Image (cartoon, rainbow, N blue to C red):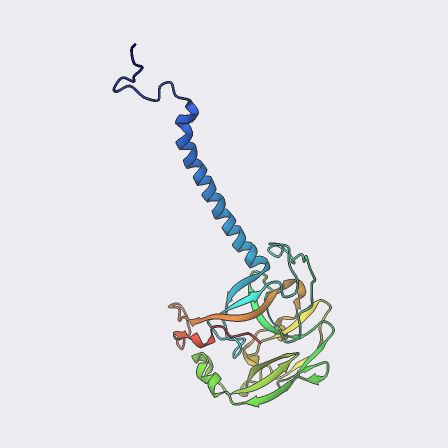
Amino acid sequence: MQENTTPEGLDKSVGQDPAEVAAPMLTKKGKFVKELKSFVLIILSVLIFRSVLFEPFKIPSGSMIPTLLIGDFILVNKFSYGFKVPFSDWFSDPIYITGPQQPDRGDVVVFKYPKDTNLNYIKRVVGLPGDTIEVIDKVVYVNNKAIETKEIDGKEIIDDMDERYKSYQFKFLETKTGEATHVTQIDMGNDYFSDFYKFTVPKDHYFVMGDNRDFSADSRRWGTVPFGHIKGKAILVWFSLSVPWPWSEDEQESWKFRPWRIGDIID
């Protein structure tokens, strides 16, 4: 009996099932699709995390000195005032699943700048809806009562401060805003922000100020912040590095790496 053999040089795929021939190609395509799905899932998870849980921000200006310094990298709790529908705040005010709850007086909040919602600002909540706010000779009054302050020695603060601010006549005040105890600084050689007329905060709006009182563009200049513009509460400094960019016009800028600020809780 003659053996059924495959002659040398003859294509061994002859007579095979076409599906078996295509199997290796389908396997490669399947792997690519699987990897693509994994990549998309990771990106989507990160975006959802940033949208509703926590989001990092970098401090570019000195309006919140000494609480926050130029170059601080902070973490913002996005669900401090309620859980949001993911991405709902990208195009309009957020839609809340739980809450929402009102920010407390003294909270440090990141929000969309009311004059240009493409920009993010960070300030401290001083006035709640219905409060009256007034500044007389650099003293802030909430509902006709001066915010409690006590002058302190600011030598350590000045040593850690960015060079551009070291030449000013600062007075440092331990300040109690709501339940938050923090430090504010005022420039005794600057009368620009000495006074602000008595103002009533509108419904669902917040009056915010920078802790660096005389170097902060805040509600005294451009008005209040609608609740829907607030992104979350600043809770932690997770890194601190100031970099003098080549195109900066400020010749006093210098490298500053502050490892001792890593892990600081924001009050």
| Residue 179 visible | yes
Residue sitting at 57 percent across and 74 percent down? 217
Q: Quadrant of the N terminus?
A: top left
- Report x, y in % for residue 40: 50, 47
Residue sitting at 56 percent across and 55 percent down? 48
- Report x, y in % for residue 96: 67, 58
Residue sitting at 56 percent across and 76 percent down? 216
- Report x, y in % for residue 51: 58, 57
Q: Quadrant of residue 182?
A: bottom right
Camera-side residue of 254 and 38: 38
Vertical placement of residue 73 versus 158, above or below? above
Judged left or right of residue 200, residue 27 is left
Judged left or right of residue 88, residue 43 is left
Q: Quadrant of the C terminus?
A: bottom right
- Report x, y in % for residue 69: 49, 75
Vertical placement of residue 235 versus 188, above or below? above
